[in-house]
Amino acid sequence: MTGIFKQKTSSNILVLLVYGLILKFNRFLHPAGPLQQPEDHFLYNWLIAFLKPLQIAPVLYVLIAFLLLYSQALLFNRICNDQKLLPRPNYLPAMAHMLTTSLFIEWNYFSAPLLANTFLIWIFYRMTTLPNIQRPAPAIFSIGVLIGIVTLLYRPAIVFVALVLLALFIMRPFRLREWAINLLGITMPYYFLALVLYLGNKWDWDKIKPVFSIGLPAIPSSLITTISISLLIVPFMIGGYYVQANLNKMYIHVRKSWSLLLLYLIMAMLIIMADGGSNYVSWMLCSVPITAFHAAMYFYINSRRLPMIIHWILFGFAIYLNYWLN
C-alpha cells in the first residue's frame, strides 16, 4: 500500500477515498452526533445551536466529519508536494493522515478540534508561502483572521497565536508593521463578535474571553489507548530521525517548513495541557504535524519491507479498534 501512495498519480485520489472508507466505515454503522466539550467557544456553540433544531441524523454528522478528514488529507498532501517537504511528489501524507486519525475513535466525529484542524492546515500553508510573497500584508492579515476564527471555535487554540508570531519571526525579516497587521487580523473576529453581541443586547464578556484551565493530560486508562499513543509516537520519532538526517539536502525554505511543523506540534501539545479533559478529542490538533513525520518515515526508509510492516501494523490495529472494539 505504501508503494501505491508513494507514486503521484491522479487515481490515488480515488484509492485514498476507498482506503479511508475501509478504515472508518464502521463510524457510519454506529454514528454519533457532534461532540460538545466545556472548552468549545462561541462559534462552535452557535453552530451546534443553529443545527440542533434541524434534527440532522447522526450519520450525516459522521459523513461531514469523514469528508472533512478526507479534504484535510488532500489539502495537506498538496501543501507537502508544493513546498517540497519530501524530495518527490507523492500521496504518503494523505495516506498517513487518514491512517493516524483512525487511531482514536473521537477523532472521527464532528467536533470543534476537527473544524479547527481544517483552518490550521490552511494557515500552515499560508505561513510557508510568506517568504515568496511580494505583497505580504494581505496574507499576514488573512492568517491573523483565520487564527482568530480558530480561537473562537476552540478556547485552548489561543496558544496558536504564538505559532503565528513565531512563523513571522522565522519566515520574514522583523517588521513591526507586519506584526501589527497580524495582531489586527487576530482581533478582527472578536470585534465583529463584540458588535453582534452588543447590538443584540447579549453582551457577555465570558462569551469572548478564551478561558481555559491548565492541567496534566489524561493518563491512558487502558492498554488500547497506550498502544494508540505508541503507534503515533514511534513512527514520528523514526520520521524525525530521517528528516534530521536529510536536512542538509533540503532547500532553506523546506527546512523552515519542517521547523514550522515542529513548532506546530509543540503548540498542539500545549493545548493538550490546556485542555485538561479526560478524553482525547483535543489531541487531534497534533495529527497534522505527526502525519508529516509519518509520511517522511514511509518515504525515506530504504528497506521495501519495513515501511510495509509498520503500515500494516498501524492499519491492522486501526481496523481492530474501529470494528471490533466499537
Image (cartoon, rainbow, N blue to C red):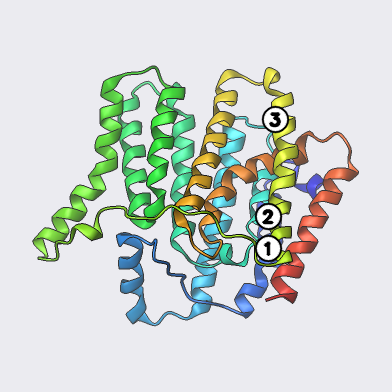
Question: In front here: 128 or 203?
Answer: 203
**311 horizontally vs 232: left or right:** right
Mark 1 and mark 3 residues within 8 Å of each other at the beta carbon: no
Q: Work out whether mark 1 precedes mark 3 in sequence or the reverse, and give the earlier one.
A: 1
Disc ID at residue 225? 1
Mark 3 and mark 2 residues within 8 Å of each other at the beta carbon: no
Residue 19 appears at what percent x and percent y? 71, 60
Residue 310 appears at what percent x and percent y? 82, 50
Task: Name above or below for residue 310 compared with residue 326.
Answer: above
Please give the residue where the numbered disc 2 appears in the rendered image: 229
Q: How many marks?
A: 3
> Which residue is drawn at the image coordinates 76% and 37% (left, top)?
299
Mark 2 burial class by Cα count in 10 Å: few <14, some 14-19, many 20+: some
Please give the residue where the numbered disc 3 appears in the rendered image: 243
**123 horizontally vs 296: left or right:** left
Query: Which amino acid is tagged 1?
Result: Thr
Mark 1 and mark 2 residues within 8 Å of each other at the beta carbon: yes
